[in-house]
Amino acid sequence: MSLTFIFIFCLLVVAMFAPFISLYAVSLIKKKEYQRHIKIQKRLFWVCVIGVVIFEVQLRMAGGSGSLVAQSKYVDTSFFRYILTAHIIGAVLTYLIWAFTIFWSDNKFRKKRTLPGFSSKTHRKLAYISIIGLFYTAITALIVWILTFYL
Ligand code: HEM
């Protein structure tokens, strides 16, 4: 079992848990535990971002885009290409929206120590889009992983 394989598996596990951890942090709002909500959301984001950066470095070292999935016997099928493209586009969009949610909300909250009115509504909308994106990213990553390493 190679180090790359173990790392990709760990990243997959983190990606699968991420939306549930984020939802747990959302549940803290009802208990008015704002600081814990913020701390968990920020830490989760940075853990995932660092994981993806290490993954990208490994991908480059392994020969660039497509090199890790080359071992899959499905690599030339249109379904595999479709799901891989859908995964990459969805994951990039999710991380962009998620990053914006974190930085924008952090900035607003630092100024007022709360997220009132418009900010609260916007925060909620962006947050739920991010969480849906995290579910989408995890599910499509799992399909790609199964087709590459398992089947
Ligand atoms: C540094 C970043 C963040 C700050 C400062 C922050 C802060 C807050 C605050 C103060 C509230 C209560 C707002 C209100 O009174 O309506 C809130 C609610 C909420 N937050 Fe965050 N948050 C952050 C990141 C996130 C992230 C990344 C997500 C999800 C991806 C998220 C999901 C939510 C949701 C869904 C609610 C509404 C919960 C409800 O109304 O029951 N937050 N956040």
Image (cartoon, helix red, strand yellow):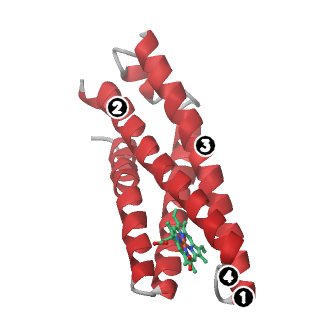
Q: Secondary structure at mark 3?
A: helix
Disc 4 residue: CB within 8 Å of ligand 1: yes
- Gap in Å between the C-alphas at discs 2 and 4? 37 Å
Q: Are marks 4 and 1 in contact (CB under 8 Å)?
A: yes
| Labels 3 and 1: the sequence-earlier one | 3
- Marks 2 and 3, Cα distance to the nearest angstrom? 17 Å
The answer to whether the residue labelled 2 contacts the one labelled 4, judged by CB atoms less than 8 Å apart, is: no
Report whether 137 appears left or right of 125.
Answer: left
Q: Which residue is mark 3?
A: 92
Please give the residue where the numbered disc 4 appears in the rendered image: 109
- Viewer-nearest of labels 2 and 1? 1
Pointer 4 local density, CA inside 10 Å: few below 14, some 14–19, many at least 20: some
Checking the image for residue 112, the label placed there is 1
Please identify, in this view, whether the residue under mark 2 or under mark 4 is nearer the observer.
4
Q: Where is 60 relative to 33, above or below?
A: above
Q: Nearer the viewer, mark 3 or mark 1?
A: 1
